[in-house]
Amino acid sequence: MYAVVGCSDCSGLWVVENPRDQETATCARCGARHRTTALRRLFEAENRGTAVEARGTMLARRAGEGAAFDAVPSGDELARAAEAAGMDDDDYLAARGVDPDEVASASDRAESGSGGDRPSVVREAVRAQSDPDEQAVVSYAAARDVPADAARDLLDRLVRRGEASVDDGTYRLL
């Protein structure tokens, strides 16, 4: 429960959450402390946004700008209009020259675990082949979006680091 309350000292308005559960509340304008039971509740609402909007309406009317305030759409309406005004992700990607379907496909592969990072794909290629020679590993990796040059380079790195060995052109992970 939210309540718009008024200060008896400075006539300031503010929103108090759960006024029945608090003993006191402090005026945001003048700093005066009030017992919540003594505060005048000008408006009550279940959600904070509604209470804030009601406070705004009261302040606008007090300033003689009620008609101007009423002409402005509500916060929810403005949020919906802002959401509808922008382009969606697919339109943005297409405008930048990126195929949205390819992005979705890559995302699906990443989430399913196929097509992970390049070193993992090359290690997986060595494990998955019965006779993992360079061509078999490169083909396997290329099918998972790892360029052939990168796959060859990663194979060489695995061997140099001692993570794999090569014997008669056949690779084994150590």
Image (cartoon, helix red, strand yellow):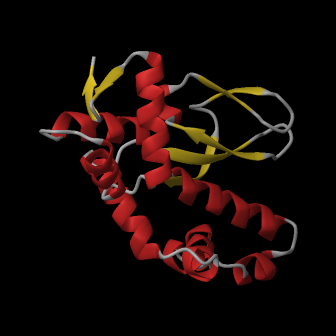
- Up/down of 48 relative to 24, above or below: below
Q: Could you say which is closer to the camera, residue 26 or residue 170?
A: 170
Any part of residue 46 in sight: no
Q: Residue at 41% of width from left, 70% of height from top? A: 102
How many numbered dots are placed on residues in this image?
A: 0
Q: Which residue sits furthest front?
A: 168
User: Quarter of the image containing the C terminus?
Assistant: top left
Query: In the rendered image, which quarter is residue 104 located in?
Result: bottom left
Left or right: where does residue 122 sit relative to residue 64? left
Question: Quarter of the image holding residue 39?
Answer: top right
Is residue 159 at least partly visible in the picture? Answer: yes
In-front residue for pair 2/139: 139
What x and y, as percent, mark residue 61? Answer: 78, 70
x%, y% of residue 125?
Answer: 26, 41
56 to the left or right of 80:
right
Q: Position of residue 95 (x, y in %)?
A: 62, 81
Q: Residue at x 87, y 67 (%)?
A: 63
Between 45 and 156, the residue placed more toward the observer is 156
- Residue 110, position as x, y percentages in the image: 34, 50
Q: Which picture quadrant has residue 108?
A: bottom left
Residue found at x 49% / y 46%: 150
Location of residue 18 with respect to 64 vertically, above or below: above
Left or right: where 39 falls relative to 168: right
